[in-house]
Image (spheres, grey):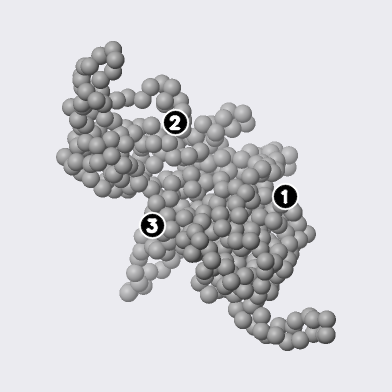
Amino acid sequence: MAEYKLLLPSMGEGVMEATIISWLFGEGDMVKEDDSVVEIATDKVDSDVPTPVSGKIIKILKQKDEVAKVGEAIAILETESTSNTIATPETTTTETKIETPSTSDIKTLEQPLTKVDTSNFSGDLYLSPLVKSIVAQENISENELKTIKGSGLENRITKEDILLLVANRSKTNTIAPIATTTTPTTTSPTPTPVTVNEGDEIIQMDRVRKIIADAMVNSKRISPHVTSFIETDVTNVVKWRARNKNILEKRDGEKLTFMPIFVRAVVKAIQDFPMINVSVDGDKIIKKKNINIGMATALPDGNLIVPVIKNADQLSLSGLAKAINDLAYRARNKKLRPEDTQGATYTISNVGSFGNLMGTPIIPQPQVAILAIGAIVKKPAVVETPEGDLIGIRQLMFMSHSYDHRVVDGSLGGMFLKHVHDYLQNWDLESDI
């Protein structure tokens, strides 16, 4: 017999730890290779951790609601050793050992959060390596760190929190001393107390809802939102989809929704206006090379998640359909990996799937824009023909484009939306699937 340490695996860039939600097996249970043994949660997504070996769980090291760092052991399994799997040309010993990652293996994993020494501080303060480097570079004092209410998981301080502190510090240094009463405050206003009456039901927010709430408030605090609207005739889009949906399902076994078409139009508009595909880093604008489209997806429990179509500009319409169907299925069945929700550079929210005509979406940070697609509705509309204007029944929908007015002015935000409109309204009925 040998002992095997089950480690929390690397889960993508920026994910350094996870919270144990529940164990699917208990101590003493037998598990097979690739069995999912524990459910974990990061600030991005919930997922399962499979075991790479078969054996018996003899000790669980991290209990429910405890936090484990990437590369840390969360359980110990007892495995069977055989000469076929253990023996090497130099030795046939079956000495029992607990497998421990080598130094080189550990370096390839995400670096853990670093605890900062904060004497006389009421709680522990953890900083990621990136945040810690910014703190050192900007000479941010411990007292300043204590004033930050972190927007990350469990109020952890994020890169955006630090950059906002730096931006506000530079402003106040040029206007007035920090301690003066005339300096604008960045603290959130005190919420109005809520009266609970007899018969009212109190529902505790779950972890995902808390993350969503913090992210939405944080986005409104960071980005001055502006929203533009346009109504689009998508009659050709509806006809093209009706003509091709059976073809794609028979050929590739994939359902053809409207989302691949919307993504294709957005990608083309981004290529026309690449300054929509940016992020803000302090006083710097980072123009993204890749076009990664986030797809807001409602979950069965009422929460929201945004899986990401990576390099959407490199996919055909059938490739987009396959990627979208796969992400949507795994999102609704809690099968997404953390990297599936990372790296979006622009997001689309299909509010029309709920019968809504339009909406004013909130920008997911650190992106600078998001598009809401409304319901497609048959309406009488003016149709221009060589013989003159006619009234016809057309398939119309509204689109609303919210953008960050720090870096996207009305002209850019409006022209981008008009190009998405043009690509959809003039959709080629002979487009390849």
**Mark 2 vs mark 1, CA separation in Å:** 33 Å
Please, is residue 374 above or below residue 252 in the view? Answer: below
- Which mark identifies residue 24? none
Q: Amino acid at mark 3?
A: Asn
Residue at left 56%, top 43%? 161
Question: How many numbered marks have been drawn onto this rendered protein structure?
Answer: 3
Q: CA distance from mark 3 to mark 2?
A: 27 Å
Provide the residue designation for mark 1.
Answer: 275
Mark-to-mark CA distance, 3 and 1? 35 Å
Residue 57 visible in image: yes
Q: Residues within 10 Å of mark 1 (few under 14, many from 20)?
A: some
Residue 140 seen anywhere in this rendered image of the structure = no
Secondary structure under the numbered disc 2 in the rendered image = loop
**Mark 1: amino acid:** Met
Give the left or right position of residue 59, taking residue 101 as reference: left
Mark earlier in primary sequence (3, 2): 2
Numbered mark located on residue 333 in the image: 3
Q: Position of residue 365 (x, y in %)?
A: 58, 50
Q: Which residue is mark 2?
A: 109
